Image (cartoon, grey):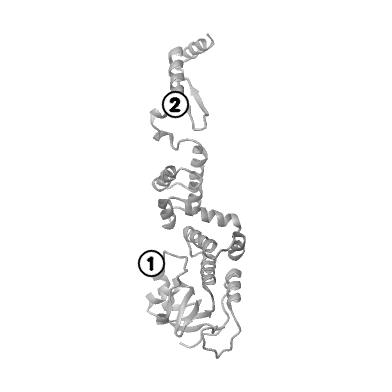
């Protein structure tokens, strides 16, 4: 396969800036490990190793098969991006999904741009490239942001500029990593959305977080429904029907029993975790209402 000429497809400002920063002036005939090709060059697939900084951890097998069929029919529309690590050796910077599909399609070589990048740039490029293509699920994005902050010592403000997202958005992603494992798995497997996860994370108690997750999966609750649950249940024991009768404070039970005895009527007292609540005295008729009022005024 000969060198493929033509202009590079637009990559987005974030990735383009990173690639531009990593490029250096070299002559077309240079063949050292610092060589950078301005056009896409044919590279043997068996010379390419995976990107150890790849933020994506899950690939949909059926989608890969569909992409493989498309590649067989139309070829690779967008070349991969690699860095040269030695004679005849390359490491993937961006395009792992395309590379996997090419292997399924039976290709032996692929078109690729060759770049120079250090480990930090490798992680940055892989992250930005995938985020701009919306290839990552929210959990993978969160892990990638965390790695950039911790491993590359990048401040949130700088990270915000690199990926084109405001700091609050980045913080919301990173907070997902504090969720219980079961919730993270559900998010990874697209059983719940990031909206569901953001509603769940506002509940501090892990047991209640898992309880909400179970309700979402069983009843297929929308994000709006979950948010409404959280608003109503905030500060209270979740889902009153699951509370045990013995959980009412002794003083409240004593007050209920005293009122029952005095009024000779059914009395209900409901108290939430903040101490707010209500006293309910049902009546069966106008005469019963007058009787209760007379006892209250006595």
Q: Position of residue 167 (x, y in %)?
A: 60, 57
Q: Callout 1: 10 Å neighbours few (<14), some, many (20+)?
A: few
Is the residue under label 1 in contact with that under label 2 (CB below 8 Å)?
no
Q: Position of residue 144 (x, y in %)?
A: 50, 62
Q: Position of residue 25 (x, y in %)?
A: 61, 84
Q: Nearer the viewer, residue 191 or 58?
A: 58
CA–CA distance in space, label 2 to label 1: 55 Å
- In the image, residue 54 above or below residue 194: below
- In the image, residue 15 above or below residue 30: above
Mark 1 element type: helix
Q: Which residue is depicted at the point 46% across and 77% down? A: 91
Furthest residue in direction top, as rendered: 298
The residue tagged 1 is: 61
Q: Quadrant of the N terminus?
A: bottom left
Residue 168's disc is: none
Q: Which residue is depicted at the point 48% across and 63% down? A: 136
Q: Position of residue 244 (x, y in %)?
A: 38, 31
Tell which circle, 2 or 1, labels the residue nearer the N-terminal end: 1
Q: Nearer the viewer, residue 6 or 36?
A: 36
- In the image, residue 272 above or below residue 38: above
The residue tagged 2 is: 249
Q: Nearer the viewer, residue 148 or 153?
A: 153
Nearer mark to the viewer, of 2 and 1? 2
Q: Callout 2: 10 Å neighbours few (<14), some, many (20+)?
A: few
């Amino acid at each position: 396969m000969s060198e493929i000429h033509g202009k590079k497809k637009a990559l987005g400002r974030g990735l383009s800036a990173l690639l531009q920063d990593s490029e250096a002036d070299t002559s077309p005939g240079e063949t050292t490990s610092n060589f950078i090709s301005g056009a896409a060059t044919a590279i043997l697939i068996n010379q390419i190793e995976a990107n150890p900084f790849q933020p994506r951890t899950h690939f949909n097998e059926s989608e890969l098969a569909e992409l493989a069929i498309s590649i067989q029919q139309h070829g690779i529309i967008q070349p991969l991006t690699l860095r040269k690590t030695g004679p005849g050796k390359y490491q993937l910077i961006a395009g792992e999904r395309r590379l996997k599909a090419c292997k399924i399609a039976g290709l032996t070589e692929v078109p690729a741009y060759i770049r120079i990048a250090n480990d930090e740039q490798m992680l940055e490029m892989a992250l930005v490239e995938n985020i701009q293509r919306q290839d990552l699920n929210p959990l993978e994005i969160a892990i990638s942001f965390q790695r950039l902050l911790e491993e590359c010592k990048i401040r949130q403000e700088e990270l915000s500029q690199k990926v084109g997202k405001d700091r609050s958005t980045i913080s919301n992603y990173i907070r997902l990593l504090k969720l219980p494992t079961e919730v993270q798995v559900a998010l990874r497997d697209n059983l719940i959305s990031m909206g569901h996860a953001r509603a769940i994370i506002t509940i501090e108690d892990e047991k209640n977080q898992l309880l909400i997750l179970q309700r979402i999966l069983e009843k297929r609750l929308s994000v709006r429904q979950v948010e409404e649950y959280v608003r109503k249940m905030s500060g209270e024991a979740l889902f009153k029907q699951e509370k045990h009768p013995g959980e009412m404070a002794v003083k409240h039970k004593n007050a209920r029993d005293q009122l029952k005895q005095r009024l000779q009527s059914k009395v209900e007292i409901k108290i939430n975790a903040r101490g707010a609540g209500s006293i309910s005295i049902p009546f069966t008729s106008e005469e019963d209402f007058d009787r209760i009022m007379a006892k209250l005024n006595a």
